[in-house]
Amino acid sequence: MRKLILATVAAVFMMAPAAALADEPIVIKFSHVVAADTPKGKGALKFKELAEKYTNGKVKVEVYPNSSLYKDKEEIEALQLGSVQMLAPSTSKFAPLGVKEFEALDLPWLFKDDETYAKAMKGPVGQYLFKKLEVKGITGLAYWDNGFHMMSANRPLIKPADFQGLKIRISGSKIADQYFRNLGSIPQIMAFSEVYSALQTGVVDGCENTPSNYLTQKFYEVQKDITVSYHAHLQYAVIVNSKFWSGLPPDIRSELEKAMAEATDYTNSIARKENEDALAAIKASGKTTLHYLTDDDRKAWQTAMQPTYKWAKGRVGQEVLDLISKELDVKMN
Ligand code: LMR
């Protein structure tokens, strides 16, 4: 009898860790570089809310905003290694992976408005680009919008000549590198988390970004002049480690897909308003001067940046340019 009791107790103890493990939620670490109070930041929190609700707590999403877990370059590497499961980098940041085609989306004045951008990404262009990530062990789940870039420096940037000799921070894209060179500037890749102090100390003279990022990172406090140029678009690819994603129980994965689809609709529906509100807040702060381009100024920027289109072919390849050109019904050179 005593033996039986001991055996039973031992069996219960041996099973206990397994049972406890079975009850442990699946953890998704979702790392990103922007503030929580931005379209991407809010989208990540919406995904967390819906994912935890739809899986009845079987999945726990830990969101790490503001580069609190990884900076730009490190985060994609960490995703491939499986140290983090989900990211939403700007599509300008895939080149270190050897995937350059995304940079086509950085061409200046490619999308004439928000609707054109949204249409392009829902169609074959978005699918084609996600396919490029598969061989890297990365699965693309969604595209999240963050509107159009403004330009800033400690001088008004109105004519192309105003860019001459300025050191401009860029996020990673060689297309952006090229259009700033076309304007006579010296572009410099730098992690997002380092931009504020680089602007403040004069390591760089200027940068480009969207109103929500200017506001939440306080770039507008250390830049005397901002041009509301909307010359290029900022979008994110929400990505996961493929091995992790395909290893999930199918019922859990489908709930997460539902959560992601809804979080994507939500994020893309708030992006424009968030950026309009951010621009209004920057204006109201009185800490910087906003400038707007006339049609002639805009044409002068476009003409100056035009060589980037020809150059892009050698960088991103004809295939993606053809796809975009067909989808948007625009000429690409
Ligand atoms: C940047 O580095 O400027 C952007 O990618 C930041 C972001 O994710 O919005």
Image (tube, rainbow, N blue to C red):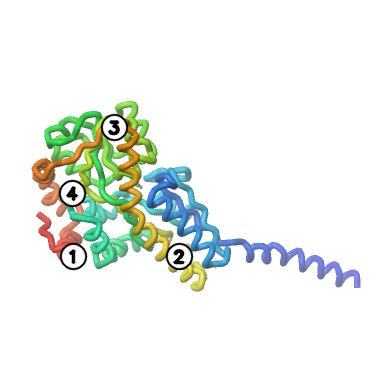
Say what amino acid the circle numbered 4 marks: Pro
Q: Which residue is mark 3?
A: 288
What residue is at 31 percent from the left and 47 percent from the top?
276
What element does badge 4 sit on? loop
Q: In this figure, which residue is indicated by the disc labeled 4?
A: 108
- Classify residue 249 as left or right of residue 284: right
Counting other residues with Cα less than 10 Å from the Cα at mark 4, is it few (<14), some (14-19), or many (20 or more)?
Answer: many
Q: Residues within 10 Å of mark 1 (few under 14, many from 20)?
A: some
Q: Position of residue 294 (x, y in %)?
A: 13, 42
Question: Please, what is the three-letter code of the amino acid marked with disc 1?
Answer: Glu
Residue at horizontal 15 percent and vertical 61 percent from the top: 325
Checking the image for residue 327, the label placed there is 1
Nearer to us: label 1 or label 3:
3
| Residue on which disc 2 sits | 259
Task: For label 2, count other residues whose C-alpha is less than 10 Å away and answer few (under 14), some (14-19) or many (20+).
Answer: many
Q: Residues within 10 Å of mark 3 (few under 14, many from 20)?
A: some
Report how far apart the C-alphas of labels 1 and 4 lie in the structure.
17 Å
For label 1, the SS is: helix
Q: Which mark is residue 165?
A: none
